[in-house]
Amino acid sequence: MTFLGGLGDVGRNCTVVEQSGKLLVIDFGVMFGDPAIMPGVQHVLPDMGWLNSRARDVVGLVVTHGHEDHLGGVPHFLRNIEVPLYGSALSMALAEHKVTEARLADRTSFHVIGDGERRRIGPFDVEALPITHSVPQSLCIVLHTPVGALVHTGDFKIDPSPVDGRLTDLGRLRALGDEGIALLMADSTNADRPGRSASETEIGATLRRLFSERPDRRLIVSCFASHLHRVQQICDAAISEGRVVVPVGRSMVNNVRIARQLGVLDIAERSLFGAEHIGRLDPGELCIVCTGSQGEPGAALSQIASGAHSDVTTGAGDTVILSSHPIPGNERSVFRMVSRLARQGAEVIHDGHEQVHTSGHAQRDELRELHQACRPRWFVPIEGEFHMLARHAGLAREMGMKAKRVLTLTDGAQITLKGNELQVRAGVAAPYHYVDGALDDLDTEVIGERLALTAGFVHVTVVLDRKGRLAAAPDIASRGWLDVTKHADVVEALSDKIARAVEQAVKGSRPGPDPDDIERVARRATGRFVGNRTRRRPAISATVIPLA
Ligand SMILES: [Zn+2]
């Protein structure tokens, strides 16, 4: 097993299993960029370095479920390695949409695995079990190997009353546990939270009550576009109150269409309207269901909040419901958006006031239930920040597993199972693969340069005449360092300082001055002056131009 992502972060999940020299990849997801430590980065993916070195051995990519942090990186993967994709009907439909949009459909094929189905992929004997989560048709992947069964839960919760009635197959996991599970890899996202997560159907009841209490208000409800059971419940509540539903936001419109085609979503044609009809419907006649619950700048709800949406404006007659919970790191942007909506006069309801959301991840009692069913020989907590993995490891030990059988690993870790033994290997490089725009070149050095620019920059240009003396006063260009209209004197003093330092250096150099030396002198003089005079730390660069 090689763990390439999701062990130490929430996101960019990727696990690779090797058997008989062949590789099977489970998930290839994205993670949101953290603007504080990686400015301008939209996504972070698992690194392809090690996988590319083994490209010829990869026999397939299995997607556990349709979330971005599990399949969002599939186009990038396919650009590097051509393999077939496997997963539930919904996961495959979502993957196909994504892959087709990226014009990569000719590099793969899509293979649906049904609940309980067992099939060969290369040397791998793969069984897919139904498991509940916040997107329909999530799968728990079981690999039957010569050393015993390996169980990869994907993301999961144990919901006793899911919207589609499709329960987690604990019976089959128990039976596999009786036969002997060699290794369990399980979701750790909520390993900190005691008790159980509320069932998805409880949220529907809250939504119905909130809707019925507001017959004359326009309703705008936001959730993840992939959370189709939530979308179903929002639609059911709206339609039962005599409203029509208007999906807003690109991925909401797409997913509603795909899910209706697959029969995952049941909404009558007459109750579904396009955004162009919003203007002619009374507030009490419609319910807008939209994307943007995480405060993502380009998504529908953020645009509505900032008055930039082409079809929807908001005001005092509106109730906005965030049927969601901020992903760690998104709290600020979510509440900035909530404040904007409140300033427009809208009533905003979120999961801090009402039970309008439940997590898709198992809490501690549900994790105990999983461990009780599986009773694995070895356990590796996956899918979580390190403290979550550590808490999940603690839970396994509390349940009686020997400490040496519980491995808290991080990205890049490699383990080998042989007979009854488990060997921890040296591991592989698993750095962040940053995505910003069209090029694939961002590394920690470029990210470091971006961070250095957050205090502005100062650029100095020094022109030397034929004799190597200053041809003019050094020129200072800056951005974000200081207000040059208020502090022209500071800029002038800096230019003088550099001129003196350069003259000094030129005088001391025989035969003529080396431009590289002069550049260094100019940069140092600038750094000293900027630090002493302004107590700020802009990035500094210099150019020396010798006249021919
Ligand atoms: Zn998920």
Image: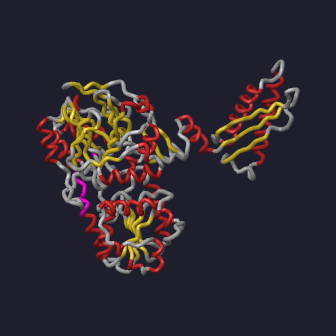
Q: Is residue 65 above or below residue 259?
A: above
Q: Nearer the viewer, residue 375 or 350?
A: 375
Point out the residue furthest to the top here: 510
Please indicate whether residue 323 sits to the left or right of residue 47 in the image: left
Who's the residue at 23% across and 37% down the image? 125
Quadrant location of the C terminus in the rendered image? top right
Q: Is residue 516 above or below residue 108?
A: above
Instruction: Please state the horizontal and vertical placement of residue 267, each as a whole percent of the image.
Output: 32, 69
Q: Magenta stretch?
A: 191-201
Q: Nearer the viewer, residue 437 or 483?
A: 437
Q: Nearer the viewer, residue 130 or 447?
A: 130
Q: Is residue 374 above or below residue 314?
A: above
Q: Is residue 320 visible?
A: no
Q: Is residue 325 visible?
A: yes
Point out the residue furthest to the front here: 106
Instruction: Please state the horizontal and vertical placement of residue 360, each as a whole percent of the image.
Output: 29, 53
Who's the residue at 83% across and 18% down the image? 510
Please indicate whether residue 217 sits to the left or right of residue 532 in the image: left
Instruction: Please state the horizontal and vertical placement of residue 533, each as a whole percent of the image.
Output: 70, 40
Who's the residue at 45% across and 42% down the image? 76
